[in-house]
Amino acid sequence: MTEVAAAREAFLRVTEIFHSIQGESTWTGVPCTFVRLTGCPLRCSWCDTAYSFHGGERMTLESILEEVRSIGCPVVELTGGEPLVHRNAFVLADRLLDEGYTVLVETSGSEDISALDPRVHVIMDLKCPGSGEMARNRWENLDHLDGRDEVKFVILDRADYEWARGVVRERGLEERVLEGSLRAILFSPVWDGLERRLLAEWILEDGLSVRLQTQLHKHIWDPAQRGV
């Protein structure tokens, strides 16, 4: 098989591809095409996309690209599950970038991001204790983030908040945002798990240079609705 033919046969397992409003990160409110890949090695206690753990449709990279092109949106996010457990997710990101798309990759932070094209905008979770997956944090990923990239903490309770606050300060993340070597630090309350007002008050009391975010798509559509 030639290299070109092999590239055409390369595939990913896809849970869904859809066009919506970006609900999280500094890209909140921007129209975006989402490519949700199937599979994740983590089992966070608050996960809202467990339906992506199994199943999905086997799609060649070319068929994925064709569907993305048909939607016609310039911003594309690769998400999951955990997209970076798939070797071909890196290839798909490269193909999208080469076609001129702005590419976001939302990752749990448990997988090595160093091989991602530096043009990608990484939105990386750091797992708080309440997720049950704190041990899966790959701390060396922080060294590969730059001014395009964002760090997200999903916060379940006060203990999670204090842990996240400690990481922000001990790892110098606020300084990295101020100097421009990191785009943003996001604090996100678990939907129906932590009152947004409380998290806002904690952030203000401590004077943190972080961005409070909620999941905008869940304010617009039913929180249980898929494909939005």
Image: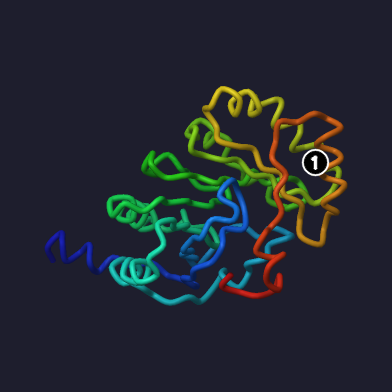
Q: Residue at x 25, y 69 (%)?
A: 9
Decide: is 133 above or below 6.
above
Residue 50 placement: quadrant: bottom right
Q: Which residue is mark 1?
A: 161
Q: Is residue 102 left or right of residue 48?
A: left
Q: Please state the horizontal and vertical placement of residue 121, each as a whole percent of the image.
A: 47, 44
Q: Please state the horizontal and vertical placement of residue 3, each as a whole percent of the image.
A: 15, 59
Q: Please state the horizontal and vertical placement of residue 204, each as a whole percent of the image.
A: 83, 34
Q: Quadrant of the C terminus?
A: bottom right
Q: How many marks?
A: 1
**Viewer-side residue, 179 vs 59:** 179
Q: Quadrant of the N terminus?
A: bottom left
Label 1 SS: helix
Q: Residue at x 68, y 71 (%)?
A: 221
Residue that extends furthest to the left in the rendered view of this protein: 2
Q: Please state the horizontal and vertical placement of residue 201, each as a whole percent of the image.
A: 86, 40
Decide: is 198 above or below 169.
below
Residue type, numbered disc 1: Tyr
**Viewer-side residue, 76 vs 45:** 76
Residue 178 placement: quadrant: top right
The local crowd at label 1, few if under 14, some if 14 to 19, many if 20 or more residues have their Cα within 10 Å, is many
